[in-house]
Amino acid sequence: MDEEAINRVILQYKKKKEKEYNNYHNKNKLDPEYMHKNKERAKNHYNLNKENRKESYNNNKELVKARSSFYYYKKNNKLDKFKEKFPHHVETLIKYNIIKGLKDPLLLPPAPVPPAVQNGEE
């Protein structure tokens, strides 16, 4: 495709998205009948897929707990405690490629900040 055809396709896509946005916000959203149908559709979808969500959660429970703990300890700069306290979580994260291994930069402690930088001198 040449440059002109690519620009034409992009322009068509943008116009389509703008038209859909305007239709929803200026027409459908203000129509009580449409909103009622949409709520019913969403409720039916929720009720039909409730078991699927529960099953997928139970299948991934171990990963979800490990990842959540990992990011908590990472945010608080306590990854060394995480490695000591939850070695099974570390194995799970390595298994799912969240971290590459024990030498992963995410698991290494942060580099110390030189005192000159801490004081604003350089």
Image (spheres, rainbow, N blue to C red):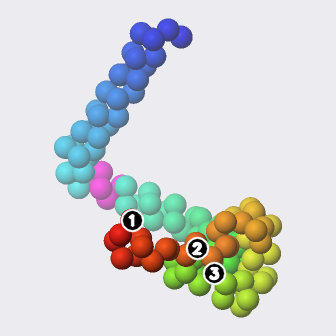
Q: Earlier in the sequence, mark 2 or mark 1?
A: 2
What span is colored magenta in the figure? Answer: 33-37
Q: Name the secondary structure under disc 2.
A: loop
Q: Between tags 3 and 2, which lies in front?
A: 2
Give the residue pinned by disc 2: 110
Locate residue 1, reporting x and y percent. 53, 11
Locate residue 91, reporting x and y percent. 80, 75
Give the residue pinned by disc 3: 79
Q: Amino acid at mark 2?
A: Pro
Question: In terms of depth relative to the viewer, which is nearer, 26 or 107?
Answer: 107
Residue drawn 49% across the image and 62% down it: 44
Q: Earlier in the sequence, mark 3 or mark 2?
A: 3
Q: Are the residues tagged 3 and 2 within 8 Å (C-beta)?
A: no
Magenta portion: prevailing SS class:
helix
User: Distance of mark 2 from mark 1, alpha carbons?
Assistant: 20 Å
Locate residue 68, reporting x and y percent. 60, 77
Q: Residue 26: within the magenta?
A: no
Q: Between tags 3 and 1, which lies in front?
A: 1
Q: Name the secondary structure under disc 1.
A: loop
Classify 10 Å Cα crowding around label 3: few (below 14), some (14-19), many (20 and above). Answer: many
Residue 122 marker: 1
Q: Amino acid at mark 3?
A: Leu
Q: Are the residues tagged 2 and 1 within 8 Å (C-beta)?
A: no
Left or right: residue 81 versus residue 33 is right
Residue drawn 21% across the image and 43% down it: 27
Q: Are the residues tagged 3 and 1 within 8 Å (C-beta)?
A: no
Q: Amino acid at mark 1?
A: Glu
Indicate the quadrant where residue 20 lies: top left
